[in-house]
Amino acid sequence: MSNSTLFLTTTLSILSLCAQAADLPGVSFPHHDWQLVCDNTRTCRAAGYQSEDNDLAVSVLLTREAGPSQPVIGDLMIGDFEGDDPVNQLLSEFELTMRINGQNLGQVLFDQGSREAELSTKQINALLEALRHTSTIEWGIDGNHWHLSDKGAAAVLLKMDEFQGRVGTKGALIKKGPLNEAKVLPPLPIPVVIAALLAKPLPSDNQLAIDNSKALREALLANIKGDEHDDCSDLEENGAAEAELSVTRLTNNKMLASARCWAGAYNAGYGYWVINDAPPYNPVLVTTSGSEYSEGVISAAHKGRGIGDCWSTDGWTWDGKQFVHTEASSTGMCKLLAPGGAWSLPTIVTDVRQTPR
């Protein structure tokens, strides 16, 4: 690929990603015991959980891609956070009986060592119908029952229909109508982002942050002053001693500056700015909630609470001119389903490709 072709491809990718982000931001809509998360391709994922007063953790994930005649895929997860629930007393491969309002809908098979299983088409259809009304939904074995809450489900599924343009069609989950799905919103392609090659560091790079610490700090703080969404109190003059500046070369005249911005009980956030490698630094903020940087990628991972049963993650990729937001995802509600969270619920998905060397 020639340099001119690569530049054009990268530019078009950036414009495509920015346009889609502006026209169709990812959606995150929690309501009671259910939540909806849709990404920038218009794929939607609805996750439901047990109610707060139920001891046995369970979740269902309903996934539907955009476009006409797309089916709903259903997955069931049984909680395995503490390691002391009834499933640990069963064989490594087991089946749960699914019942809705007392009606037996057959078995759900869990493979050896897994707490996740697929629901059949019959089971998914029955579940979708039940979630339109007040229903009792459960999976059981040997006197143990995992109850799925229906509270919030109808609102979440209606929001999915609205986001995908299905309201009033025969394929809508909640507000069905006589229209076919020929004109529902189509899926959007996954944006392509070309990750740029990084420049080799210079011998003087290590000294830049040391020799220019005061001027750099002032420039970085001025860049976010007054922005209520960005906090970097550790970088201030009387901030934490751990907020040491570091810089990493990106191009022949651009660098990435970073420092710890804040710390809480179980999370910390690092600030990342693209700067000129000489005054004026003209910093451009990427995030004040990063976790680490490696090989052209800034990543962030944060717990929803201290025990770590729910997380959010983000990623930004250097394309040669800026850091593009190439990943945003969460693992769902904090419901004691699994260490590290239950599901992958993205709002931003991209196809990151490496520049040929």
Image (cartoon, grey):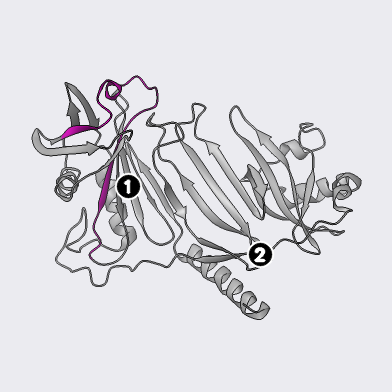
| Residue at the spot 63% in from the left edge and 44% down from the top edge | 290
Taking depth in this image into account, of 115 and 289 the one nearest to the observer is 115
What secondary structure is found at the residue carrying circle 1?
strand
Q: Amino acid at mark 2?
A: Ala
State which quarter of the image contains the N terminus: bottom right
Q: Where residue 130 sits in the image (x, y, percent)?
A: 16, 43
Direction left: furthest residue: 103
Q: Where residue 123 sits in the image (x, y, percent)?
A: 16, 45
CA distance separating discs 1 and 2: 35 Å
Residue denoted by label 2: 196
| Residue 357 drawn in magenta | no
Q: Quadrant of residue 310?
A: top left
Q: Amino acid at mark 1?
A: Ala
- 10 Å crowding of disc 1: few (<14), some (14-19), many (20+): many
What secondary structure is found at the residue carrying circle 2?
loop
| Residue at the spot 28% in from the left edge and 57% down from the top edge | 161
State which quarter of the image contains the C terminus: bottom right
| Residue at the spot 32% in from the left edge and 27% down from the top edge | 52
| Residue at the spot 32% in from the left edge and 47% down from the top edge | 46
Residue denoted by label 1: 46
| Residue 81 drawn in magenta | yes
Q: Where residue 86 sits in the image (x, y, percent)?
A: 27, 21
- Total marks shown come to 2
Q: Earlier in the sequence, mark 1 or mark 2?
A: 1
Q: Which residues are magenta?
A: 69-97
Taking depth in this image into account, of 38 and 63 the one nearest to the observer is 63
> In this rendering, is residue 79 above or below 22?
above
Question: Which label number is shown at residue 66?
Answer: none
Residue depth check, mark 1 versus mark 2: number of the one nearer the observer: 2
> In this rendering, is residue 280 above or below 206?
below
- Residue 111 seen: yes
